[in-house]
Amino acid sequence: MDSEMLMNVADYARAARRKLRKDVHDYYEGGALDEITLRENVAGWERLKLYYHVLAGVGPRELSTFVLGQRISMPIAFAPTAFHRLACADGEIAAAKAAKAVGTLFILSSLSNTAMEAVFAQAASPRWFQLYIYKDKEITRALVQRAEAAGAEAIVLTVDAPGLGTRERDGRNRFSLPAGLAVANLAPLGKGNIPDVQGSGLAAYVHDNFKSDLSFADLDWLCSCTRLPIIVKGVCRGDDAGRISDHGAKAIVVSNHGGRQLDTAPATCEVLPHVVDVVGDRCEVYVDGGIRRGSDVLKAIALGARAVLLGRPILWGLCAGSEQGAAHVLEILRRELDEAMLLCGCTKLSDVRASLLRP
């Protein structure tokens, strides 16, 4: 598809579908079980209505914000997603360069196809590293130490994957990584290969390696073994968010893993205001899941999010156009957010309040 015809995120999704092998497309697109949460993440933002102001004297919009004290050009950032080289040859390096080009936060997945040192060398600040806790904590500690040395400025601990939710598409496709690709960050630690098994190789990898009895003690341990701030990703409840804040996290990501873990978990837009109400000003709150339009970003800000994180849309951009495609996806959403702010009567992000979501 001609880049001039890629006008929105859905266009990029269609372009990616045409280019990707079926097993890769299903891996990126799929959710758990009946994929109800997967669909609800998108539908939830669509159901929220904007009760816009008029005659508000709106001037040029200011879209920049801060995450953990660092300025980003807009409240739209890169979520950590695995295996970017399935989307394009330059993989995570293309994604890091795209984030740098648009001036926003980049979060590298621990399950990347490119070693963190090579990726962070191409990434601008802020750059964070996403982490799973392995059964062998020395593997986890080694990853954290490498991330610190490579220039990561925060650790994003994913807590909603003590095991892998059943993704039936991956099981049918016997999803694994093709020859030549590995979990690059784990390869030096002997954990770089996704097994070729009957069913999902990734599910087998997670079962064999990830710590299934995660607890607040693990969060305390992580906080004790790094100087970097900890962000906890995968939160679905206000009471959990409050305890996570009490245990030292500097930020929380409201997330259901893109609908890929527990099916029938609520859409993230439903959870977000409850988390914000509980944690207040104690830590920053971000949200991912189902963001497809700039108006969705505005709704998330109205519900109390500091910023949104994009997963699948970045992958679609990488597939359709590598670095330039991923950057263009962000620019599309920036333009749409700017337009939504103008039409809602908002000059700056602090004008975007919950009152916009009710008459």
Image: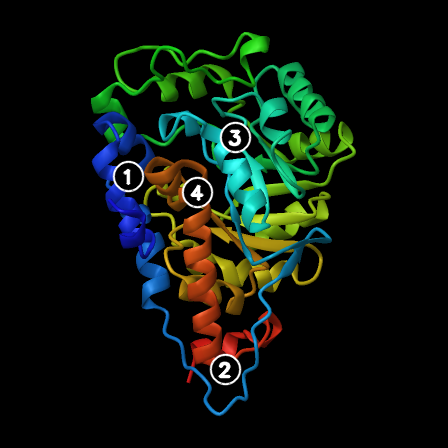
User: Which residue is under mark 4?
Assistant: 324
Relative to 1, 204 lies left or right: right
Are the residues at dot 4 and dot 3 in contact (C-beta closer than 8 Å)? no
Relative to 20, 298 lies left or right: right
Residue 242 higher or lower than 311, as above or below: below
Q: CA distance from mark 2 to mark 1?
A: 35 Å
Residue 147 x, y percent position in the rendering? 67, 26
Numbered disc 1: secondary structure? helix
Q: CA distance from mark 2 to mark 4?
A: 31 Å
Count of marks, rendered view: 4
CA neighbours of label 1 inside 10 A, class few (<14), some (14 to 19), many (20+): many
Residue visible at 45% across and 89% down? 54
The mark lying in front, picked from 2 and 1, is 1
Q: CA distance from mark 3 to mark 1?
A: 19 Å
Are the residues at dot 2 and dot 1 in contact (C-beta closer than 8 Å)? no
Q: Looking at the image, is mark 2 or mark 3 earlier in the sequence? A: 3
Q: Looking at the image, is mark 3 or mark 1 earlier in the sequence? A: 1
Task: Give the number of the disc on residue 93.
Answer: 3
Are the residues at dot 2 and dot 4 in contact (C-beta closer than 8 Å)? no
Q: Amino acid at mark 1?
A: Ala
Q: Amino acid at mark 3?
A: Ile
Q: Looking at the image, is mark 4 or mark 3 earlier in the sequence? A: 3
